[in-house]
Image (spheres, rainbow, N blue to C red):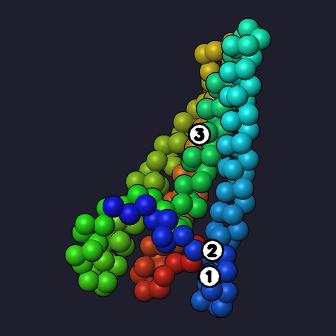
Amino acid sequence: MSHGLDMIETESSVPSHGTESLVDRVLRVINHAVTFLCCVSLVIASIVLSYSVFARYFLKIPTDWQDELSVFLLVGAIFMSAAMVQARRGHIGIDAIASLLSPRANAWRQLGVDIVSFVFCTYFAWKSWILLHEAAVEGYRTSTTWEAPLWIPYSLMTAGMALLSVQILAQVIAGFRGRKPIS
């Protein structure tokens, strides 16, 4: 099993010559910006949850909003960072088959997996868009006392899946062109 950490490239190891397409460059900039925002989101979620524990157990102050805010921040961080993880092939993969295949056969296997992943993620993004639209038009809110609008997490889910779909599509195109996509 591979966790892909050995495949993560540092900024200095990424080539800066002309083989990188405009889409690759734009995706890299977006992924870096989104990664920074996701990191900030995780820090804020940890602060909010720490405050919640302190306020509930030591000050006996109820905090109804912190669970939803933390879930919204975590949902956003998870979905929005998926494209960056995919760009670096950081998702968990099983190496049992890949280690048995030739490099050429493995490239075709990876391309097939990317195509299936693209179809799934595009469908997920489309269904998320429908859910987002429904929540925005109908004014859906959470069923807690905070009553946060549900378009917030749905928009993060939709944007994250759309960005992931674009990232996978760029990798599929790179696979058909026979070049390694740049993360």
Could you say which disc has been placed on residue 50 in the image?
Answer: none
**Along the horizontal axis of the image, is 131 left or right of 124?**
right
Which residue in the rendered view is the most extreme toward the front?
Answer: 58
Circle 2: element type: loop
* Residue for point 66% across, 91% down: 17
Circle nearer the N terminus (3, 2)? 2
* Residue for point 43% across, 86% down: 178
**Along the horizontal axis of the image, is 157 left or right of 34?**
left
The N terminus sits in image quarter: bottom left
Mark 1: amino acid = Ser
Question: Within 10 Å of the Cα at label 3, are there few (<14), some (14-19), or many (20+) other Cα atoms?
Answer: many
Q: Which residue has dot 3 on it?
A: 75
Tell me where residue 85 appears, x and y as whole percent.
Answer: 54, 60
Q: Is residue 132 above or below residue 57?
A: below
Report if residue 24 is visible in the image: yes
Tell me where residue 29 appears, x and y as whole percent.
Answer: 70, 68
Q: Is residue 124 above or below residue 19?
A: above
Could you say which disc has been placed on residue 10 in the image?
Answer: 2
Mark 3: amino acid = Val
Tell me where residue 156 appears, x and y as whole percent.
Answer: 63, 44
Q: Which residue has dot 1 on it?
A: 13
